Amino acid sequence: MKILVTGGLGFIGSHTVVELQQEGFEVVIIDDCSNASENVLDGITAITGKRPQFEKLNLRVKEDVLDFFKRYPEVGGVIHFAASKAVGESVEKPLLYYENNLNSLIYLLQCLSKKDNSAFIFSSSCTVYGQADEMPITEDAPVKPAESPYGNTKQIGEEIIVDTCKVMPQVKAIALRYFNPIGAHPSAEIGELPIGVPQNLVPFITQTAAGLRDQLAVFGDDYPTPDGTCIRDYIHVVDLAKAHVVALQRILQEESEGNYEVFNIGTGKGSSVLEVIESFERVSGNSLNYKITGRRPGDVIQAYADTSKANSVLGWKAKSTLDDAMKSAWQWERKIRKQPY
Ligand code: UD1
């Protein structure tokens, strides 16, 4: 079966394409290359031995989306990653974020609703929970008002899918709420490629160790946590990619309950910023230059997943440790510094 992966050249998308191909799916990628390089196709091909089909197009252009589905009637499922994801930028340019992230979703769902049967996997985020009242966070935890237009596009995106699924039983969807994806493929053929100064912790750590940044700022050590730094659930991107494949298979094998489901995808284990730094130092043998600075506005104190629903219903569980993920992130960073994309 052929699966459309939108944003398939991006960080999570590219790893998911690899897992899909390794499970025997054919893949066609749509990406506008606004935040990713076409060279990622070479990385995917080096791992799987099979070059996915690729269409460079912008999902905000409705005619192009309609035209794509006319040209690829064999597409039986869609995994939708394509979206803008910089939290700070979304505050500066809210309309761009709403336009990018919501129009593309609407056009895809409009096309899928014309098919007899279609599977749709949506990239959602633990950001929908805000600062949850209880840890670990279950899927039943209330969705809190979004902190940013980016977060709001994930919440509204889920609502658009829920409303669509209510009246269109032919659309079968699963939303995956990711916790913090990190790491890279163990082959070091694909990984995270942030443009400019990384906003996320792990690429900032590896770029600092590689000499691209002088120092990591640890945003606050006065939080009510054991070591005072914030706690997150860092999940290896390969584990996360595999979750997409099992979610898709659940829909295709008609095992879903109803036609809309939501799952948390994390490890279930919280790690503090200092623990992430320690893990990096352990696996890399480097001592990281960092200093404690003030809190970053908008950061939640802690967020880690209750993954029991994904474990029992999807039969999926994260396998990699934080050390595995940090090691792969470091291998990738060293490789791209020697051999830039
Ligand atoms: C961020 C986004 C979230 C998005 C997720 C995707 C924000 C507020 N949230 O989550 O919406 O879904 O990325 O991966 O941007 N940290 C430092 N120094 C740094 C960078 C980060 O100390 O230079 C700390 C942060 O304070 C936080 C932790 O590291 O405690 C993780 O930060 P980050 O990687 O940016 O992820 P989130 O903020 O959890």
Image: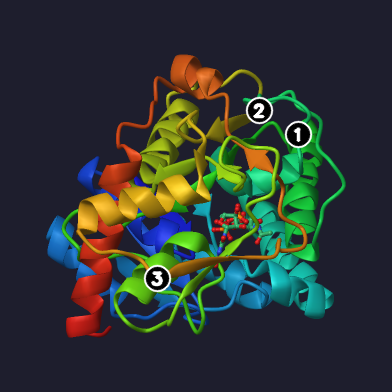
> What is the quadrant of residue 176 in the picture?
top right
Residue at image position (43%, 77%) is: 36
The residue where tag 1 is placed is 132
In depth, the one of 301 and 341 nearer the eye is: 301
In this view, 246 is above or below 211: above
- Position of the N terminus, as image quadrant, is top left
The residue where tag 3 is placed is 289
Q: Is mark 2 within 8 Å of ligand 1?
A: no
Most extreme residue toward the top is 312
- Say which element carries label 1: loop
In depth, the one of 332 and 288 nearer the eye is: 288
> What is the quadrant of residue 8 in the picture?
bottom left
The residue where tag 2 is placed is 137
| First reached walking from the N terminus: tag 2 or tag 1 | 1
Residue 169 location in percent, x, y? 69, 31
| First reached walking from the N terminus: tag 2 or tag 3 | 2
Report the amino acid beneath label 2. Ile
| First reached walking from the N terminus: tag 1 or tag 3 | 1
Q: Quadrant of ligand 1?
A: bottom right
In this view, 265 is above or below 145: above
Q: Residues within 10 Å of mark 1 (few under 14, many from 20)?
A: many
> What is the quadrant of residue 92 in the picture?
bottom right
